[in-house]
Each structure stands twice: as structure tokens, then as C-alpha cells.
Image (cartoon, helix red, strand yellow):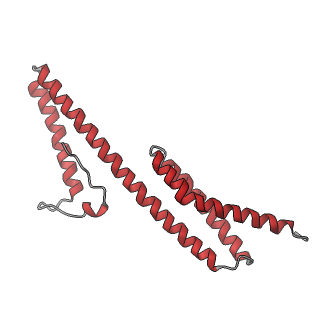
Amino acid sequence: MSTKQPTDSSSTEHEGKSGRTLEELYDHADDLIRQMDRLVHDELGHKPEAVAEWEEIMRDYEAALAEDQREAEEAKLDREIHEWMDRINADIDQLEKLDPVDLEFDEALARMLASWREVDAVMRLRCRHYPEKLVKWEEEVMGPVKRWEGLFAADMEAEEAKPGN
């Protein structure tokens, strides 16, 4: 039994003949299955073997639904990770246009690092049930951020070590 939910936002934009989105149709189908579950229990309550067989079908349905939801959430996390990588890379591109000796560079980098750390906290929370996505986040996004933090810390140390500071 397939309960495949759309994982791509563009697939939810397609409408059936009724004018409803795929997501609405999936929700309607789920409502019908749940109504059918109640009806089967009402009608077959006196036949324990039939009810047991139906409950097995419903367990399979719930498991398939949970797996589909997990896959959809993983796909969503992948998109978010890529979006943040793109944003952070755009920030880095802006930093690379600045003169590292300029105070504006230090201020911009400090703001960006603080912003990236806030995003890191949110994404770690979002990825807490998806260890493979957390590893991807740490390696692909936070790895470069940590390198920039190291450069910033070294720059600040060198600045404070100069005479007169």
C-alpha cells in the first residue's frame, strides 16, 4: 500500500479535476481511511479474526505514513541546509570584497558569525532526530563557519597584541 506524500513543494501545486491540491487529496484519502477504520471495527467487531487482520493493515498503513513523513522532513532539511549554505556563501562573498584591514570588515564578520551561530542553534534543533542531516550540517555548513571564526579570533588576538591597544 503506497501512501507516498509529495516531498517537493511543486508537486503540491498541481491540482486534480476537483481543483484540490495533491496534499488536500492525500488528506482527504487519509480521512476516508480513518472513517473506514471506524466502520470496520463497528461492522466486524463480532469477528475478532477479521478485526485483527484489519488492524494489521492499519499498522502497515501507519508505518508507511510515518516513513513518508520522515522522508518528506529529510527532504525539507536538505533544502534548508542548501539554502543556508547559499546564504552563508553569499555572506562570505561579501566579506571577501572588503579590505581585511578595514574596521568595517571586523564588524561585518562579527555580525555574520553571530548570525551564523544563531542559525546553527536552530538547525541543530531541527536536525536532532536526523543524525545524518546533522552530520551534513556540521561538515558542509559549520565547517567553513568554524574556519572563519578561527580567522576572526586570530585577527582579534593580533590586533590586541599590537602596541597601543
Q: Does residue 158 appear to the left or right of 40 in the view shown?
A: right
Nearest the eye: 139 or 79? 139
| Image mark count | 0
Residue found 21% across the figure and 57% down from its top: 22
State the image coordinates of residue 35 (x, y, percent, origin top left): 16, 38
Nearest the eye: 112 or 88? 88
Q: Does residue 82 appear to the left or right of 28 in the view shown?
A: right
Most extreme residue toward the right is 163
Q: Does residue 88 appear to the left or right of 160 in the view shown?
A: left
Look at the image and tell me in which quarter the N terminus lies.
top left
In the rendered view, tell whether residue 147 sits above or below residue 28.
Answer: below
In the rendered view, tell whether residue 75 sits above or below residue 131.
Answer: below
Residue found 46% across the figure and 64% down from its top: 83
State the image coordinates of residue 60 (x, y, percent, origin top left): 23, 35
Nearest the eye: 13 or 78? 78
Residue found 75% across the figure and 77% down from its top: 101
State the image coordinates of residue 142 (x, y, percent, origin top left): 57, 58
In the rendered view, tell whether residue 146 sits above or below residue 27.
Answer: below
